[in-house]
Image (cartoon, rainbow, N blue to C red):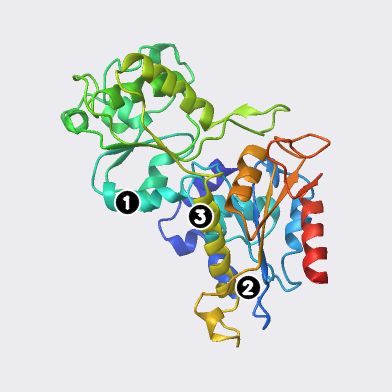
């Protein structure tokens, strides 16, 4: 689905023509005079979707958060550790799959906090790793000298000794040719020191990526050179596993981090240093709280309500986190504390009959539809 959306999006460079529904969203926000006192954060994989299929009655559940006119009446966001695509592309995909108008401002991905590091690495050579369009994501955030690990590896002959055996590799890059301009470009990249590495989304080729990342990290950013100071390494999240289309969980970015760290620590005198973002980091939930409050302000921008709402200082009394992963969604909400209330579904990683023993949720339900039903009954009755 996302690849189809990307193909459609690439047909135009005009952002308004790419996403004409965005202006409609801003007009459709509810202008009710009484602002809601609560907001909701939904995980995506294992809660709302499994692969590209809606689950747990998610389309019907989410439609209940809108007025009959299509105006948003309950503020909600998607809070996912997943990623690899721009928030605008992800919002468009969710809109099509769920039959709703969803704004990019309602999508928070694991790599969204990387925006905060633009000031430090804006003009430096950085490498983006992962499925999807990791370099495009970073470029949109403001990084001006970013390469995907796919393109970077192609600048070095024989850096991946297994490349000849990877028949599934079909990527072709312009500077892979032998003309003078392409050769100069590759040499220029090889001579630049990599200043940082960002694991934006799940690695597609673990063997190559671990090899190339170790080359970068142990040489101070100059593969093939002497051992040097390790450049900064950032992970969008540290999920060990997640629920995809296969019945049992699949290894996530946290598993890749473990593998990379194990290899690096065997070949380098100093242990691997890295920074991880994403849930369950409490800062992610604090940011989500701010975004939900801003969403309330957007919903009431044209309404005749109190000045403090218009200025974006409206505070929500209760925030709900609906997730399927106890160690990520529920643990994060518990760490964040008040005003977060955690709801655990059985449609993803968690499938237990009782509450999770280590990271118990405030409520356990079968589906996201049951979670939304509980929230609306509780909030409407209070």
**Where residue 296 sits: x, y (%)?**
59, 71
Q: Secondary structure at mark 2?
A: helix
Above or below, 313 against 210 in this view is below
**Mark 1 neighbour class, 10 Å CA radius: few under 14, some 14 to 19, many 20 or more:** some
**Where residue 102 sits: x, y (%)?**
61, 60
- The residue pinned by badge 1 equals 118
Which is more toward the observer, 117 or 51? 117
Q: Secondary structure at mark 1?
A: helix
Q: Quadrant of the C terminus?
A: bottom right
**Where residue 212 sits: x, y (%)?**
34, 23
- The residue pinned by badge 2 equals 28
Q: Quadrant of the N terminus?
A: top right
Whether pointer 2 and pointer 1 mark residues with C-beta atoms closer than 8 Å, the reply is no
**Where residue 338 sits: x, y (%)?**
63, 59
Q: Earlier in the sequence, mark 3 or mark 1?
A: 3
- The residue pinned by badge 3 equals 88
Which is more toward the observer, 197 or 178? 197
Above or below, 234 against 371 in this view is above
Residue 76 figure quarter: bottom right
Q: Earlier in the sequence, mark 2 or mark 3?
A: 2
Q: CA distance from mark 2 to mark 1?
A: 32 Å
Which is more toward the observer, 246 or 353? 353
Q: CA distance from mark 3 to mark 1?
A: 19 Å
Going by the image, does 196 lie left or right of 189?
A: right
């Amino acid at each position: 689905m996302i690849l189809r959306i990307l193909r459609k999006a690439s047909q135009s460079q005009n952002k308004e023509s790419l996403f004409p529904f965005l202006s409609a969203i801003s007009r459709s926000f509810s202008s009710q005079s009484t602002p809601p006192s609560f907001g909701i954060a939904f995980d995506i994989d294992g809660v709302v979707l499994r692969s590209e299929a809606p689950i747990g009655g998610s389309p019907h559940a989410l439609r209940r958060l809108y007025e009959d006119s299509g105006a948003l009446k309950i503020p909600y966001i998607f809070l996912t550790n997943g990623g690899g695509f721009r928030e605008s592309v992800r919002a468009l995909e969710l809109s099509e799959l769920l039959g709703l108008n969803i704004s990019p401002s309602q999508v928070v991905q694991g790599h969204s906090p990387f925006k905060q590091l633009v000031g430090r690495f804006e003009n430096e050579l950085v490498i983006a790793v992962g499925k999807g369009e990791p370099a495009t994501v970073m470029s949109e955030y403001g990084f001006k000298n970013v390469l995907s690990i796919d393109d970077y590896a192609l600048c070095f002959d024989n850096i991946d000794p297994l490349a000849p055996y990877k028949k599934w590799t079909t990527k072709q890059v312009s500077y892979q040719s032998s003309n003078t301009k392409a050769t100069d470009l590759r040499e220029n990249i090889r001579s630049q020191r990599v200043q940082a590495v960002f694991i934006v989304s799940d690695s597609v080729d673990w063997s190559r990526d671990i090899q190339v990342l170790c080359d970068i990290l142990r040489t101070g950013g100059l593969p093939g050179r002497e051992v040097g100071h390790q450049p900064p390494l950032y992970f969008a999240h540290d999920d060990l596993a997640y629920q995809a289309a296969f019945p049992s969980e699949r290894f996530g970015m946290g598993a890749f981090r473990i593998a990379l760290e194990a290899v690096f620590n065997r070949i380098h005198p100093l242990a691997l240093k890295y920074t991880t973002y994403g849930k369950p980091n409490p800062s992610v939930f604090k940011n989500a709280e701010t975004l939900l409050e801003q969403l309330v302000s957007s919903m009431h921008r044209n309404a005749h309500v109190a000045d403090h709402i218009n200025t974006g200082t409206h505070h929500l009394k209760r925030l709900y986190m609906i997730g399927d992963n106890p160690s990520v969604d529920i643990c994060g909400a518990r760490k964040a504390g008040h005003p977060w209330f955690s709801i655990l579904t059985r449609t993803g990683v968690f499938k237990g009959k009782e509450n999770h023993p280590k990271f118990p949720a405030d409520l356990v339900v079968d589906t996201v539809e049951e979670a939304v039903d509980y929230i609306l009954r509780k909030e409407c009755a209070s």
